[in-house]
Amino acid sequence: MIFFISSPVYAKGGIFFFGEQDDIHQIMDIELVGAENEDLVLGYKTHSYFVFAGVYMKDEGYVLGVKGNDSLYYPLPTGVELEQFQSFGYLPNPLPDYEIPLIDWLIGYSLWIILIILISWVVLSGNKTEEKAND
């Protein structure tokens, strides 16, 4: 028995770091297919906002990603529909834990890291200038 999931959603993204970006991260292969008979994977979605560097990033939870396409996904079913998929063995029960890698968090908040480094450098440079003036 194969279930079809409908209503795909496109994740936006790109390599030019300005604007919003959604990323789909694969957790595991599953035996579900999408509305266009594409293979699906269980994954999770992160949402980031960039202004040349990361302003913020948040975990948006589980999704059903399209295998081989990191910008197309389906929302994970909830409630009774999720329980049915799990009882038929199409989705694991319980859903597996996942952890967003530290590097993703660092990139997601990189603007603030850059600002802290720049402000620290300016403050420390100002202190050295004052010490030289006092000598």
Image: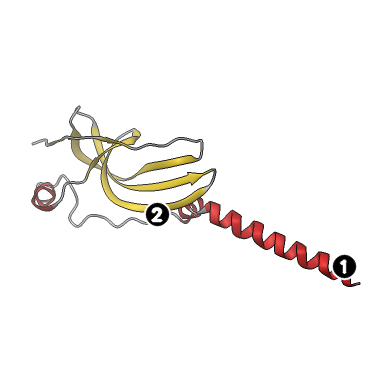
Q: Residue 73: percent from the left, percent from the top? A: 27, 38
Q: Which residue is drawn at 38% across and 47% down?
A: 47
Q: Is residue 46 left or right of residue 75?
A: right
Badge 1 is on which residue?
A: 132
Which quarter shows the N terminus? top left
Badge 2 is on which residue?
A: 100
- For the residue pair 19 and 13, the one nearer the viewer reads as 19
- Give the colour scheme shown: secondary structure
Q: What element carries label 2?
A: loop
Q: Residue 131: percent from the left, percent from the top? A: 84, 70
Label at residue 109: none
- Point out the residue furthest to the top here: 36
What's the distance in space between the residues labelled 2 and 1, CA to CA?
46 Å
Q: Residues within 10 Å of mark 2 (few under 14, many from 20)?
A: few
Q: Which residue is drawn at 27% across and 49% down?
A: 62
Please tell me whether residue 48 is drawn above or below residue 3 in the rendered image. below
Q: Residue 82: percent from the left, percent from the top? A: 13, 49
Q: Residue at x 49, y 40 (%)?
A: 18
Q: In this view, does 94 lie to the left or right of 121?
A: left
Q: Which of marks 2 and 1 is in front?
A: 1
Please tell me whether residue 80 is drawn above or below residue 22 in the rendered image. below
Q: Residue at x 18, y 48 (%)?
A: 91
The amino acid marked with disc number 1 is: Lys
Q: In this view, does 76 lie to the left or right of 132?
A: left
* Mark 2 or mark 1, earlier in chain: 2
- For the residue pair 114 and 126, the one nearer the viewer reads as 126
Q: In this view, does 125 lie to the left or right of 34?
A: right
Q: Residues within 10 Å of mark 1 (few under 14, many from 20)?
A: few
- Point out the residue furthest to the bottom here: 134
Q: Residue 122: percent from the left, percent from the top? A: 71, 60
